Image (cartoon, rainbow, N blue to C red):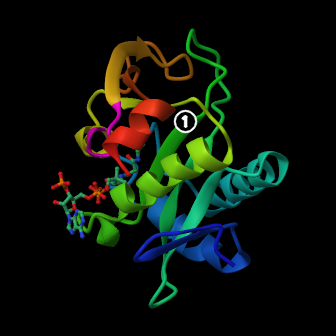
Amino acid sequence: MYIIETARLGLRDWQESDLSPYAAMCNDPRVMEFFPKTLTKEEAREMINRLKQHIAAKGYGFWAVDIKTTGEFIGFVGLETPRFEADFTPCVEIGWRLAYQYWNKGYAQEAARKCLEFGFNHLGLTEIVAFTPILNKRSINVMKKIGMTYVKDFDHPNIKLGSPLRKHVLYKIASKHCSMVIF
Ligand SMILES: CC(C)(COP(=O)(O)OP(=O)(O)OC[C@H]1O[C@@H](n2cnc3c(N)ncnc32)[C@H](O)[C@@H]1OP(=O)(O)O)[C@@H](O)C(=O)NCCC(=O)NCCS
C-alpha cells in the first residue's frame, strides 16, 4: 500500500478518509500561516483531487503520509512539478504540509529524505528544488536539514504585489550531492 516507507512513516496515494483530517488541517491558521488563506472543505477536496491527478499522471506527487504503527494520517510530503513559470521552471519541487499536532517530531525531515532518494534513484532526477516564503523559517529549516542549499530570493508570480508572502527563497539539491550528504 505504501509507495515510500521510512522508519516511522508510510507515503501513499490519497484515499477518501483523508478528506476530513486534511480539510481540518487546511482550515487551521497555524498550518496555513504562510499561505494566502485557509481552505474550505470544498477547496481541500479540490486540492486532494488535483494531487491525485498529479500522482496518476506522473507517478509521483505530494503523497499522503501515515504514521505506520497507528495508521494516523498526518499530512503530505512529496515531489511535484510547479504550475507557475519562473526562470527555474520546469523543475521538480519537494514540499510538505503536516497537521499542527505532528510538528516537532522530525516527521517532515524523515519523509523528505526518502522522497529525495526516490526522486534521484527511482525517477532519475538530477536536481530537486524547494521554495517557500522567506518568513517560513520552519520550512527553510527542513530544507537545510535535508542537505539543500540556498540559491536565491525570488518573487512568487502567483502572490499579489505588496503581500509579505510574495518574497520567496529558492533552495536546491543535486543528485550527486545528495548521495554524499544524506545516505
Ligand atoms: C514546515 C513543516 C512541515 C515543518 O515541520 P517540523 O515538524 O517543524 O519539521 P521537522 O521534521 O524538521 O522537525 C522539526 C524538529 O523536530 C524535532 N524532532 C523531534 N523528534 C525528532 C526525530 N526523531 N528526528 C528528527 N527531529 C526530531 C527536531 O528538533 C527537529 O528540528 P531540528 O532538526 O532543527 O532540531 C510544518 O511546520 C508545517 O507543516 N507547516 C505548515 C505548512 C507549510 O508551511 N509548508 C511549507 C510550505 S512551502
Prevalent SS, magenta region: loop
Q: Quadrant of residue 181?
A: top left
Q: Secondary structure at mark 1?
A: strand
Could you tell me which residue is drawn at 46 percent across and 70 percent down? Answer: 6
Residue nearer the viewer, 172 or 178:
178
Q: Which residue is mark 1?
A: 93
Mark 1 residue crowding within 10 angstroms, few (<14) / some (14–19) / many (20+): many
* Quarter holding ligand 1: bottom left
Residue reaching furthest to the bottom: 70
User: Which residue, as the protein is rendered here, is positioned at the far right?
Assistant: 57
Q: Is residue 52 magenta?
A: no
Position of residue 92 measured from the top left corner of the image (x, y, whole percent):
60, 33
Q: Is mark 1 within 8 Å of ligand 1?
A: no
Q: Is residue 164 visible?
A: no
Q: Point out residue 157 in the picture as x, y percentages from the top left corner.
A: 54, 16
Residue positioned 35% across, 40% down in the render? 180
Q: What residue is at 56 percent from the left and 22 percent from the top? A: 158
Q: Nearer the viewer, residue 119 or 160?
A: 119
> Image quarter for residue 170?
top left
Tally of numbered discs:
1
Residue 39 screen position, x and y as percent: 54, 53
> Considering depth in this image, is 53 or 148 the residue closer to the camera?
148
116 relative position to 8: left or right: right
Quarter of the image with the N terminus is: bottom right
Q: Which residues are magenta?
A: 144-148
Residue 12 visible in the shown view: yes
